[in-house]
Amino acid sequence: MAAISLAGLTKSFGDVTAVDHINLDILPGEFITLLGPSGSGKTTVLRMIAGFETPSAGTINLDGVDVTMVPANQRDVNTVFQDYALFPHMSVQENVEYGLKVKKVAKAQRRARALEALESVALGEYASRKPSQLSGGQRQRVALARALVNRPKVLLLDEPLGALDLKLRQQMQFELKTLQRNTGITFVFVTHDQEEALVMSDRIVVFNAGRIEQVGTPQDIYEHPLTEFVSEFVGTSNVFSGAQAQSLSGGLDRFSVRPEKIEINSAVTHEITAQGKLKDIEYLGPLIRYVVDVDGQHVIVLSQNDEQNSKDLANHIGHAVTVSWRRDAMQVVT
C-alpha cells in the first residue's frame, strides 16, 4: 500500500489552475523529491498533502485512508519549512517539546522524546540553548527534531535548505538523507534545485505548469529525459530538432545529448559527427565548457580539465572544430 496516494488532484485559485489532475503514489520509507521551477505546482501539492490547502478536485490517501477533507492537525504528517519557525524565547528543548505539550503528553515523557529527537540530529548537547545561539544549519536541525518528535509516518519538507550557504546546504543534504534512512520515515521534499534533487532522492517527480512531466530515479531522469523541459531543467542538454536533427541522426525529428557525452576534436571516431566553429571556452575548475556553433545552434560540450588541451583549443576560438558523440548518447524527447 502506498504511504501517500494522490488521484486526480487539482487546485485552482480563481481562474488559475496551480495543480492540474495529478496522479502519484509515494511508497513507504521513500525519499521522494518534487522538483520544478517557481509556480510549477510542487509546493501547492505539498500543502494539500499537509492539509494547509483544500483540493478543488481529486483525493489524498494516507496509508489507504482518505484524508482529503481531514484537518491538518489530524493528519499523521509533519512539515518542515525553510524559515524554521522556531520560538525565539524558548530553549531548543522547549521548541522540540512544544507539539507534545499541546497534545498534553506527560512532562517526563515529552522531555525524554525531545532529547531522543535532538540526539537523532546530533544536537543533544544544545538542548538548553536559545535558537539565536545556533547557526543556520543547527536551527534547521532543531526544526527537523521538532517534526520527528511526533514520530510521523510522513515528513514534508518545503525547500528547507534554501536559506543555507552552499557548503552547509551540501552538508545538510547528506545529514537529511542519513536521517531518513535511519528513521524509515517517508520524506516528501520540495526543491527547485536540480542538483539537490539528484543527490538526495530515491525518486524525482518533475513538475511543470501544474503537471507532472516525468517520474523516475535520479539516473532515469538525467540519463533518459522524456521531454525537452526535463532535459533542460534537470542539468544542461543540447536539443536538436527539425532538419538538423534528421540530418545528424539519420531520421530522428527531435533528440537531446548531454554536454559531457559530446567530444570536441576527438581522436576517436564516433557515429555522429558535425562540423562547427568554436565560439568560447569557459574554465570551471575540474571541467572545461566549450561553446560550438553548429549551423547556427550553440552546442555545449563539457570535458574534464586537461590544461594542455584547453590551451591548444583556446588558440582555435573562431576556427573550425569537430564535435562528435555515440549514437546511444541521443535521447528522443517530445
Image (cartoon, helix red, strand yellow):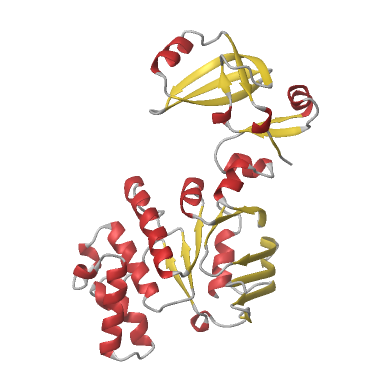
Is residue 95 at least partly visible in the picture? no
Q: Pinpoint residue 60: horizontal percent, then vertical percent.
A: 63, 74
Height in image: 253 above or below 295? below
The residue under the point 39% across, 60% down is: 178
- Residue furthest right in the image: 251
The residue under the point 46% across, 12% down is: 314
- Residue furthest front in the image: 268
Examine the image and state in which quarter residue 252 appears: top right
Left or right: residue 257 compared with residue 113: right
The residue under the point 59% across, 71% down is: 4
Height in image: 233 above or below 151? above
The residue under the point 39% across, 17% down is: 307
- Please state, as top left, top right, bottom left or bottom right, where the C terminus lies in the image: top right
Q: How many marks?
A: 0
Is residue 237 at least partly visible in the picture? yes
Left or right: residue 93 compared with residue 205: left
The front one of 19 and 274 is: 274
- Please state, as top left, top right, bottom left or bottom right, where the N terminus lies in the image: bottom right
Left or right: residue 285 compared with residue 73: left
Q: Pinpoint residue 221: horizontal percent, then vertical percent.
A: 60, 47
Q: Pinpoint residue 284: horizontal percent, then vertical percent.
A: 41, 28
Height in image: 82 above or below 307? below
Q: Pinpoint residue 78: horizontal percent, then vertical percent.
A: 46, 73
The front one of 281 and 324 is: 324
